Image (spheres, helix red, strand yellow):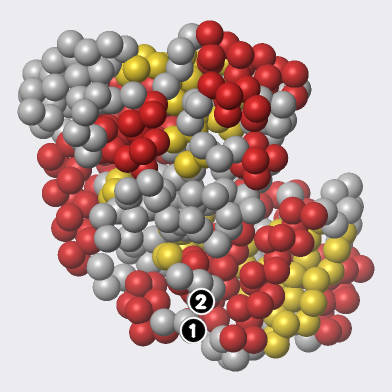
């Protein structure tokens, strides 16, 4: 059953206690105390595309480097890093091939890596290599590949587009209840169907009518016909889950037909630069996003920017959601290590992860509440993504704005606990 009272409070921003705790945690984490790292080095490998010819992002590496630099310099009981173990960041580029991913995994084993942060859509062949070596992916990205489906040591921090769509729909239907007839338009692919399904099931539970899904191919650039179909069906709200250029084509076609539905979506589909050029300027758009706007005044965002600058990686290219994820991953390791009574090793980190649940979550500067010890509803993609914290954003004056002052728990909105 949906806990509507709790969710309304969450999305209305009744989070004073959480905000104060996040601000206090951020202040404590930035104490300027001499930190010692007498222990052995703890190696973290970043696996992602590291050049402009690959369809990945080097900003993930920059975020990890900034987080490691900050963690190494932050003293807890006089010790920096992971209870005195200095984090050393190394990287590997898989060259956009499964063989490259396997190559990186073998390098991780040879280098005795303790954790892997990976954003690699070609992952798969590396799974058995990591499993045999017992190398976890603590704080990693989630991409919906077989790496996550089969990788039992995969502990992501950030959700993919499935809970982002759920959170955007919930917010829109609660704040604009007159929009009751909903449909979706998406690329005809298995992953798309997986992401549409929970939104379709949530609509009738919130008093609306689900009209169905219109499919397009990834190559379609003129969406006039499918948009006209949605208009004829009377869809008042549309979940647009396509590539960015198709989302732009959708709004162009809709404007040409005099059709102005509410639109929900996920952050990869709607880059701010594209939305600013929409015919209606993004007026009716609500998206779910893995991070808040990176120019927001939240303490966690300010802390991230400060750490990026301190590590000399604060460039426009690196200031992305992936940069935030990489940074958060290092702080997740640090906070997790503080709960370990003995030595910090990959095995002890994994053991401690399973003790972190709803009663003792790890709060990462108010940006993510992490409960890796609880198996989440999205277990077919990420066995340990128990809480899907999603930021709900609107668009105005050429940029995204927060519609809620704390992230939304998408699984609770779906009625799953």
Q: Secondary structure at mark 1?
A: loop
**Alpha carbons under labels 2 and 1: distance apart:** 5 Å
Give the residue at x 26% y 55%.
360
Residue that protrudes farthest toward the top in the picture: 110
Residue 19 coordinates in the image, percent (x, y)? 22, 59
Q: Is residue 357 left or right of residue 321?
A: left
Q: Is residue 110 left or right of residue 270?
A: left
Going from N to C along the chain, the mark reached first, 2 or 1, is: 1
Residue 3 coordinates in the image, percent (x, y)? 41, 82
The answer, for residue 207, to whether it is visible in the render is yes
Give the residue at x 42% y 65%.
408
Label 1 belongs to which residue?
1
Q: Is residue 326 above or below residue 19?
A: above
Q: Circle 2: is it few (<14), some (14-19), or many (20+) Cα within 10 Å?
A: few
Foreground residue, 394 or 379?
A: 379
Q: In the figure, residue 138 lies in which quadrant?
A: top left
Q: Is residue 300 above or below residue 287?
A: above
The answer, for residue 311, to whether it is visible in the render is no
Label 2 belongs to which residue?
415
Q: In the figure, residue 186 lies in which quadrant?
A: bottom right
Give the residue at x 53% y 14%.
109
Q: Is residue 206 above or below residue 289?
A: below
Q: Is residue 127 left or right of residue 74?
A: right
Q: Is residue 288 left or right of residue 55?
A: left
Is the residue under label 1 in contact with that under label 2 (CB below 8 Å)?
A: yes
Give the residue at x 58% y 55%.
379
Q: Which mark is residue 252?
A: none
Residue 82 coordinates in the image, percent (x, y)? 25, 25
Residue 60 coordinates in the image, percent (x, y)? 49, 29
């Amino acid at each position: 059953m949906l806990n509507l009272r709790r969710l309304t409070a969450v999305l209305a921003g009744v989070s004073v206690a959480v905000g104060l705790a996040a601000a206090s945690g951020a202040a404590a984490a930035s104490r300027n105390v001499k930190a010692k790292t007498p222990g052995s080095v703890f190696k973290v490998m970043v696996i992602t595309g590291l050049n402009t010819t690959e369809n990945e992002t080097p900003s993930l590496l920059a975020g990890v480097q900034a987080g490691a630099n900050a963690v190494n310099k932050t003293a807890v009981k006089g010790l920096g890093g992971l209870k005195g173990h200095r984090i050393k960041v190394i990287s590997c580029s898989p060259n956009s091939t499964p063989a490259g991913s396997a190559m990186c995994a073998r390098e991780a084993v040879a280098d005795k890596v303790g954790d892997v942060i990976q954003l690699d859509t070609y992952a798969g062949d590396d799974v058995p290599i990591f499993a045999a070596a017992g190398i976890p992916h603590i704080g990693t990205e989630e991409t919906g590949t077989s790496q996550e489906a089969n990788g039992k040591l995969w502990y992501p921090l950030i959700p993919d587009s499935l809970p982002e769509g759920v959170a955007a729909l919930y917010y829109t239907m609660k704040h604009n209840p007159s929009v009751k007839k909903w449909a979706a338009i998406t690329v005809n692919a298995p992953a798309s169907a997986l992401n549409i399904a929970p939104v379709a099931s949530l609509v009738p539970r919130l008093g609306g009518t689900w009209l169905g899904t219109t499919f397009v191919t990834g190559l379609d650039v003129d969406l006039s016909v499918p948009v006209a179909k949605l208009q004829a069906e009377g869809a008042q709200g549309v979940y647009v889950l396509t590539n960015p250029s198709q989302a732009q084509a959708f709004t162009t076609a809709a404007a040409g037909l005099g059709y102005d539905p509410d639109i929900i979506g996920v952050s990869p589909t709607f880059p701010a630069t594209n939305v600013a050029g929409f015919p209606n300027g993004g007026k009716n758009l609500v998206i779910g996003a893995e991070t808040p706007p990176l120019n927001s005044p939240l303490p966690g965002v300010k802390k991230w920017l400060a750490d990026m600058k301190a590590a000399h990686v604060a460039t426009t290219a690196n200031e992305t959601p992936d940069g935030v994820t990489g940074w958060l991953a290092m702080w997740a390791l640090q906070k997790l290590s503080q709960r370990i009574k003995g030595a910090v090793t990959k095995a002890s980190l994994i053991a401690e992860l399973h003790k972190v649940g709803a009663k003792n979550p790890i709060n990462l500067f108010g940006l993510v509440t992490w409960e890796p010890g609880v198996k989440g509803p999205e277990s077919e993609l990420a066995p340990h993504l128990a809480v899907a914290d999603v930021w709900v954003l609107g668009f105005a004056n050429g940029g995204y704005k927060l519609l809620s002052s704390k992230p939304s728990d998408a699984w609770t909105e779906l009625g799953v606990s």
